[in-house]
Image: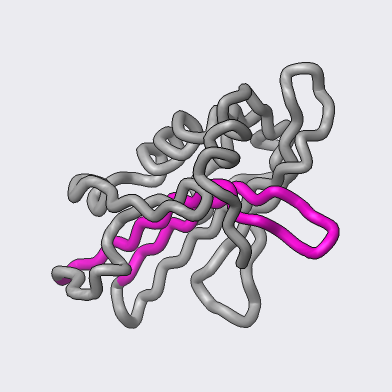
């Protein structure tokens, strides 16, 4: 994965963006317990920003880990460049691996998060992600484990 410079990432995230009708969480068949939601972003005028949001949620029942990896990518001809990523792993036991501690990537910069992030609910994680990225979801994605009938939206 390519990372853009931190300054470029901050410039891209400085504008209000909207994720209109983000769709449904999709299960990842090769990785049980994992769901992904992917959608494009538009600016205040409704024009494409060439940015994409990827929200990944994973709950592993065997290890008891809960992972949130919420990312904004800049689409390029050759692939995707990471603009921002919020990565939170929650565990019933103390996490010893320093890389698994809550953190965020702003372009090529990796910054350690606060310890309280490891206890956040889905809503708190999504709220922080939206504040850091200037993204408004219309409608706001429900928790990936919430079951909703199609007519209930």
Closer-to-camera residue (121/132): 132
Residue depicted at 30% across the width and 79% down the height: 63
- Pick the quarter of the image with the N terminus: bottom right
Residue depicted at 54% across the width and 42% down the height: 142
From the viewer's perspective, is 117 left or right of 105? left
Q: Which residues are magenta?
A: 65-93
Within the image, what quadrant is residue 91 found in?
bottom left
- Pick the quarter of the image with the C terminus: top right
Residue depicted at 65% across the width and 77% down the height: 29
Closer-to-camera residue (153/73): 73
In percent of width and height, residue 69 lies at: 48, 57
Most extreme residue toward the top is: 45
Q: Residue 68, relative to residue 22: is it above or below?
A: below
In percent of width and height, residue 105 lies at: 45, 52
Number of marks present in the image shown: 0
Q: Is residue 101 visible?
A: yes
Residue depicted at 83% across the width and 27% down the height: 47
In percent of width and height, residue 10 lies at: 53, 35
Q: Residue 38, relative to residue 91: is it above or below?
A: above
Within the image, what quadrant is residue 100 found in?
bottom left
- Which secondary structure is most common in the magenta stretch? strand
Residue 7 magenta-drawn?
no
Residue 74 magenta-drawn?
yes
């Amino acid at each position: 994965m390519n990372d853009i410079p931190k300054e470029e990432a901050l410039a891209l995230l400085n504008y209000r963006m909207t994720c209109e009708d983000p769709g449904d969480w999709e299960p990842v068949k090769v990785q049980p317990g994992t769901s992904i939601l992917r959608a494009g972003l538009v600016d205040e005028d409704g024009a494409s920003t060439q940015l994409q949001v990827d929200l990944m949620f994973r709950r592993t029942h065997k290890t008891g880990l809960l992972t949130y990896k919420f990312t904004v990518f800049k689409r390029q001809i050759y692939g995707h460049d990471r603009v921002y990523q919020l990565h939170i792993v929650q565990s019933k036991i103390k996490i010893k691996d320093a890389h698994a501690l809550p953190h965020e990537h702003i372009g090529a910069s990796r910054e350690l998060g606060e310890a309280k992030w490891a206890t956040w609910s889905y809503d708190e994680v999504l709220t922080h992600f939206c504040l850091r990225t200037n993204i408004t979801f219309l409608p706001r994605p429900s928790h990936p484990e919430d079951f909703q009938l199609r007519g209930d939206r």
